[in-house]
Amino acid sequence: METTGVWLIGARGSVAVTSVVGALTLRAGLAEPLGCVTELPELSSPAVPGLADLTFGGHDVSDLTLDKKAESLVAAGVLPSRAAEAVGAELAAVQRELRPVPEAGTQLGVARLIAADIDDFRRRRNLERVVVINVSSTEPAVAPHPAHQRLGLLDEALAGPDRVLPPSSLYAYAAFTADCSYVDFTPSTGARLPALAELAARHGSPYAGHDGKTGETLVKSVLAPMFAMRHLRVRTWSGTNLLGGGDGANLADPDTNAAKAGSKQRVLAETLGYQPQGSSHIEYVDDIGDFKTAWDLITFSGFLGTPMRMEFSWHGCDSALAAPLVLDLARLTAAAHAAGRSGPLTDLAFFFKDPIGDVPHALPDQWAALVAFVRGLHAPS
Amino acid sequence: METTGVWLIGARGSVAVTSVVGALTLRAGLAEPLGCVTELPELSSPAVPGLADLTFGGHDVSDLTLDKKAESLVAAGVLPSRAAEAVGAELAAVQRELRPVPEAGTQLGVARLIAADIDDFRRRRNLERVVVINVSSTEPAVAPHPAHQRLGLLDEALAGPDRVLPPSSLYAYAAFTADCSYVDFTPSTGARLPALAELAARHGSPYAGHDGKTGETLVKSVLAPMFAMRHLRVRTWSGTNLLGGGDGANLADPDTNAAKAGSKQRVLAETLGYQPQGSSHIEYVDDIGDFKTAWDLITFSGFLGTPMRMEFSWHGCDSALAAPLVLDLARLTAAAHAAGRSGPLTDLAFFFKDPIGDVPHALPDQWAALVAFVRGLHAPS
Amino acid sequence: METTGVWLIGARGSVAVTSVVGALTLRAGLAEPLGCVTELPELSSPAVPGLADLTFGGHDVSDLTLDKKAESLVAAGVLPSRAAEAVGAELAAVQRELRPVPEAGTQLGVARLIAADIDDFRRRRNLERVVVINVSSTEPAVAPHPAHQRLGLLDEALAGPDRVLPPSSLYAYAAFTADCSYVDFTPSTGARLPALAELAARHGSPYAGHDGKTGETLVKSVLAPMFAMRHLRVRTWSGTNLLGGGDGANLADPDTNAAKAGSKQRVLAETLGYQPQGSSHIEYVDDIGDFKTAWDLITFSGFLGTPMRMEFSWHGCDSALAAPLVLDLARLTAAAHAAGRSGPLTDLAFFFKDPIGDVPHALPDQWAALVAFVRGLHAPS
Amino acid sequence: METTGVWLIGARGSVAVTSVVGALTLRAGLAEPLGCVTELPELSSPAVPGLADLTFGGHDVSDLTLDKKAESLVAAGVLPSRAAEAVGAELAAVQRELRPVPEAGTQLGVARLIAADIDDFRRRRNLERVVVINVSSTEPAVAPHPAHQRLGLLDEALAGPDRVLPPSSLYAYAAFTADCSYVDFTPSTGARLPALAELAARHGSPYAGHDGKTGETLVKSVLAPMFAMRHLRVRTWSGTNLLGGGDGANLADPDTNAAKAGSKQRVLAETLGYQPQGSSHIEYVDDIGDFKTAWDLITFSGFLGTPMRMEFSWHGCDSALAAPLVLDLARLTAAAHAAGRSGPLTDLAFFFKDPIGDVPHALPDQWAALVAFVRGLHAPS
């Protein structure tokens, strides 16, 4: 029985469509659930909804049909052709649950229409709860505004003519007012504003983010602790990320790039205790498509200062790395909501490059926190 | 006050001399203790002897002087020249504590002479205890012998004309009979025989091993768990190790090579739960000297089977990676002995490629065990 | 008009089927002739038959159908699916020209049956000439035999019960007796025996080989001259080749491996003027399939001996790299035959790892020789 | 007998001091002439002055002594310590030939003082001719000025108060007025202005440039032709250069960086016949010092479009790669001057990233031109 709604912002994009097609394929027993963390025995729990319990809907500015998008993902090597073919009918059903991004005179008006779309979905499909997940393109950094600080000021400002909130935050606002939880898989602002924390608390909504940890940063989150545990001094850590696809083009924009590159180095300072030299560079290379290549050079000093070095290159398919984590986050956030949790889910740091809260950044510590989190979940009596 | 003896088997080799020069340099405050794990705050404990508490001696078949060896290590870029110069006088003092490998008609005779050398060292330098550490060349795999199984049979066989034990095990035998602890930093057999476990128990001697985890396997011990935690299926893990120096030449021997290469892949099966395709290949390249280059290719499947890959190369100085771990093991094993521990020190798995006992192989788990071990140490009342 | 026959030994293998499907696809105008050297303007010549002039046949021990094989190559990512579909009918026609490897009481009997198959093909298809190309699996090194030295002895020995020639050489023998040219794309012995040179001369047959230069060795043949031209001293050149597929399994055999690995290092001594340390290692990794990964480490000394290094990794599809060269060799060898050339075609060294004759090994010199060769070709008056 | 002067602009910098110490070391027979192209047998010619024929002087804005600079180069691993020690006395003699950069009210006044310094050097040391070589820091791109187009306008403008020429071009102007030849080893403007070409022609001065080809571009100049010769379509070529040292900091400036990065991709369009996607990125990493790491990813299409890829990383010491080429250029340019050549020496394209003139960019073609050039040199009768 489908009890948990997953409402995707950017529902016709690569990550969303890979997530949906993948969920339908797994549900049909056509593939092993590789990449799905919640399918590991350590995270098995009756409190977590199954893949079969999920039903999908969402907003998108584009009107590309899901089957066309799936076709292009097959051509790009992201989806296996048999998968896309096998789930065609179900995909068409999901397509019917998609809505265009609403327009209105004020941001408050837009937020109400978004919330209404989500609420309709919940009632129409008879769902116990809905998780709203942002997998749309990364936004440029947002300018501070006094209304971000307090909910009272925000409500007032949204009713005026200004664009007070970036889209990701407006979706979070709408999600909370609709009593939903919210996950931000992108580096955008999302729920990270004091006024929105206030709103989430008022509605008892949990939320999680930011920026799915899919590739180079994932590797950093195990290698940097290794150097620390061995008392080896990292001197330089320089990374180059070559990526194509829609997100690549968007991240080539210097503003967006700066934000992303910053969050990719954060794990180093957090796990090493100091910031080594070097930066993380992002370059758009259209030909590479969804398959990202990252190359990192690490120079370090060992005993008596002896200089040594390590290099790695990572050739990963971004959407295929992201999609199972989106499904994991949907299931875990829904379970947290059902268990009565609200506010930031800091125990989900395992999934994010730039996790909310004062949390560990070494992957093994994040894993331990995640395992404990799942074990602690049970429906409130 | 120097209270803890470190008796090095292979005392004139690269690892031993780097360890000794390094300890003297650190003691003189001429360098930061990089690479020394016991100098990290998490492992700080009054129960662990300091670097200044160590005094060195050892056996070697060679008669190369320590200053000549240090000079060649400076030329090879392993030791900084100022370090070797600054500690010349103290190095000469260590030199006076070195002994040739004794000869006798039977292995029992040799063992007694070894034990006598160690005992002399302890009494002459007024030491509370001595840790015997094998850092000599890797031995070929040893043929099984019935006397390996029971101490009674072993004692009897050693008194006969046959070479029942390989050198590493004969040193372990001598160490235990002299009431010392024993550490094997090499892949050789060492104390890993039932008869020797019996002997260690009788003398209350702790021991640790095998095969210092200095480079490629260290990286594997964090990357393999990363793939496991993310439910990514590793299909192939192939490694090539190019190394020169004495150990390189020795490992080029197919017999030795096979043993070493096998132990380098063990971490994969232990942390992934299955053995991926591929092997770990060792090649001797004289020109590279003590600086090893390892290259690994990992192919893996993600969501819906999407194929991805990762490569890394590691350029490390073997002796500079090994030496601080030798000092760590000396200090920790001495502390364990002082605290009344005997038998295999499984909590030191952090240091080894092929650790004794049924222990975790993921580095973070080994780290947690090590931290708990140190916290649990205190002198018996 | 199809005037030139291409008789493939191993006609149902990956390289052969990729060559045939590729030729049919290019002829149909469905793809650009990437990888086909003879399609470059510098090598354009009326003396060289076009792709449309080729007609295919061959021998194979297997009875796998060409469409089944093409299907598996599509699944492996070697052939694009549209290509294999588009040329299905023509592929079936090629299939009808394939013959099983004949059997007879003596090797002479087998050779006569092979020659008869080729001759039938030529007459049935009304071809001016046929090029026999060996693309079957690599053979183990062959034991010397006195009959290899003189044609008289060889004819006599073949009539006896012994297996005097390895299959590749028996095919060369048959090709020459049928007045055909012969190309060996593998490291096998092929025509490289004095008795066979005698036979080729008698029949006016040209021949070329050995071992198609498709990946790592290709890169070596430009990098090694670069070091030489810059007077940089290469100290170590170590390579690791991971490959799957049929040829991978075969090359994992130590005997075959040794021959191949040796020929892969020859380019270094030939272009540098000395043999650096290091070797070329081949490892079979089934999962990798037809996509080979090679990794090479090069250490070198510059001004005043300063040590430096370079690494490269190459991820190439072996069959897709080999197939266009097979087509090039067919066309160029046929043109040479038409122009009255006989004996070893040393100007085709550009295509081979281990070229016949005293020829340049640097790729640019081989290219210059190839361009001059094509310009010198014209039909004898 | 020292007959050829080498006047270095930036004489106290890393490249200059490595060149001078190296020349003195080689002259003393203390090292093999690795990296020196003119010492290869193919380029041996009585027309080319020997290393023993060179005498050094130069300008620099810094007043760091040569022995201090040499010391820092030893510490950085660029120079061997024995070399710097052995040539101390001769280095002090070179030091006495260095001059501060002169100052005057107009650029014409400065140029005259520079020319006078060079002329003094020539007469004092009784030299037949002097080659002026720019090895100073890279300048930002220069703004166009009408006086750059014609010598008459330039002479007039230099007498006025404006800074019409960048320093590199002012040095070229001074070199030509002093009847010297000029080499630009940097990407700066140097002699590349029509007015300066006019001046060189008037004085019969040869000149060469621009931007010494020492690392990543050197590799590109053999790999790109390899792809072209094999008809493989390069889709992406993206490079990352991590470098420290003085030049690194300077190139981190976006203006300078852009110019350099552009010239590093030029070889691709010139040798492939089209510009693949991707760019060449330069990042300053202080810790790396003079040892540069470049990493390049190349994606390409083969037969029927099959996608493949290659990566390389290059770890080279920039000064040690540059210095022998500086000595080569001094000797070859002096020989050209002696042979009566004037104007741009396009046959020296082998040495440059961005060579003057309509010349080949593939290294082997540049090599052939260089060999022919040296064979054609002889003193005019």
Image (cartoon, coloured by chain):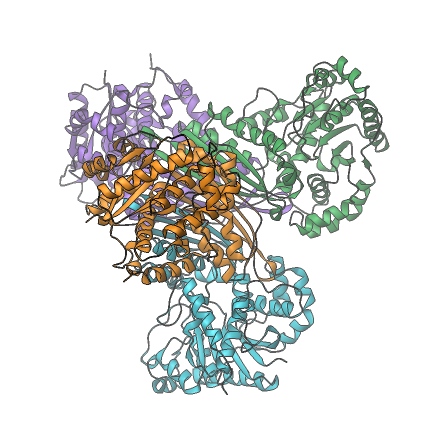
Chain colours: A orange, B cyan, C purple, D green
- Say above or below: A126 vs D338: below
Residue D215 horizontal side relative to residue C333, left or right? right
Tell me the residue at 39%/81% (across/down).
B196
Q: Nearer the viewer, residue A99 or D259?
A: A99
Residue A52 horizontal side relative to residue B357, left or right? left
- Say above or below: D179 vs A182: above
Residue B365 horizontal side relative to residue C124, left or right? right
Q: How many marks?
A: 0
Res. A192 visible in picture: no
Coordinates of residue A274 in the picture (x, y in percent): 57, 55
Tell me the residue at 79%/27% (across/down).
D128
Coordinates of residue A350 in the picture (x, y in percent): 40, 54
- Say above or below: C60 vs B170: above
Residue B5 horizontal side relative to residue C158, left or right? right
Coordinates of residue A296 in the picture (x, y in percent): 49, 46
The quadrant where residue C181 appears? top left
